Amino acid sequence: MSSYSQLFAQHLDTLQQRTRDILQQQGIGGLAIHSGQTHRIFLDDQDYPFKVNPQFKAWLPVLDNPHCWLLVDGVSKPVLLFYRPVDFWHKVAELPNAFWVDFFDIRFLTRPEQVADHLPANKQEWAYLGGHLEVAELLGLGHPNPEAVLNYLHYHRAYKTAYELECLREANRIGVRGHIAAKDSFMAGASEFEINLAYMKAVGQGANEAPYGNIIAINRNAAILHYTHLSTQRVPDAERHSFLIDAGVDYHGYASDITRTWAWRRGEFADLIAALDAQQQEIIDEIKPGRRYSELHLQMHHRLARLLQSVELVDMSVDEMIHTGVTNVFFPHGLGHFLGLQVHDAGGFMQDERGTHLAAPEQFPYLRCTRVMEVGQVFTIEPGLYFIDSLLEPLRKNEQGKRINWNKVEALRPFGGIRIEDNVVLHGDGVENLTRQAGL
């Protein structure tokens, strides 16, 4: 057995144990996990791109095949019902032939409704996990998406197995390759659209395979946090200021989520990128087991406030900047989030396996994680510094606006903003930065 297969075997053992525990707790016979179905576009004969159920791809990297099922009870060999229709209109999924096949009892479906022939006799005692409750009802599965089961699985998903960590490492290695190609394309004068093509070619994944829409932003577009427009117009060199790319890849169902910002020429903005990059590395060094993620986020606001002071953008004390919300104007989003099967992975607000919710602090409503950081968890760390018109204009009009260096703000507006994002793992002996060790 290869080392990769051994990692996968250990991963399945962990999933089986988690399944066994929650089924015993809830008195449920097993889990019928649905890969999902395609969704037809309204008033059209085309489907939206298929996205697999995360609960399904937690067990194996079958990412592009609807109408598949997993039947698991935590004890028996998992049953995979693999959909292979007779179809001359579309490509049919290849016969399974990968490192994971020996770990499953694989049976084939040629029609979706054949799943009924494989369900256990006590199917009313089984839970359905998936996005099509009408299918669960039709099949007679008695527990559709039970909250206690989902909470338990989402909570424990924060603790990554060795197999999952290796997938995340590879997702970062591939993603870094794309980021370097994108930077080179920007420096060669390409448009946003052309840069995105260079990125996708380098990683070997198109828009439908990507874990999220690539953010490829030149100049002021970098101030739009989720900018995905992709202009086809080339920006002349004289008007070219900055480039922000936030893009990841999918590897065996696991996502990387990486951001870098580049300056077209040396100067104040390039220095600001370097300064924020240094602060990002220092805040990563402060990640420790037992510390709450929201405390780390607050500490980043202290660091940003000192940076705003040092570059003479804001003439206020650190505490005053944070208390009055001035740092929120320049850094409005959260420091990061869990990462794994989903870009914003499940369980970020859960304080225990029952799903007890702890919301983001009122002062920082867009923070996506309030968990206590523990060994085995994977986070993004992505501080930013932006010049966003819709946030700056109210600041200009209030009392704190008198303490802002508006001449400098105006000089930096054309650059849009900065975000630096790495993917990190918390180990017992320190933090592993998946992104930096991949060469970015």
Image (cartoon, grey):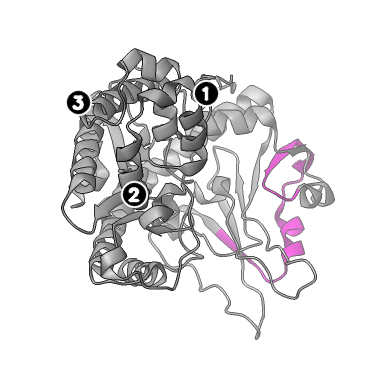
Q: Give the magenta range.
A: 106-132
Give amino acid for label 2.
Ile
Q: Mark 1 or 3 closer to N-term?
A: 1
Q: Mark 2 or 1 closer to N-term?
A: 2
Mark linked to residue 251:
none
Give amino acid for label 3.
Asp
Q: Mark 2 or 3 closer to N-term?
A: 2
Q: How far apart are marks 2 and 3 (CA)?
A: 24 Å
Structural crowding at the residue carrying mark 3, measured as other residues with C-alpha within 10 Å and reported as few (<14), some (14–19) or many (≥20): few
1 vs 3, front mark: 1
Q: Which of 423 and 51 is in front in this view?
A: 423
Residue 155 x, y percent position in the rendering:
51, 29
Mark linked to residue 360:
1
Q: Distance between the residues labelled 2 and 1?
A: 23 Å
Q: Is residue 30 above or below residue 307?
A: below
Mark linked to residue 429:
3
| Residue 40 occupies quadrant | bottom right
Q: Name the residue under label 2.
A: 258
Pick out the residue farthest to the left.
Answer: 266
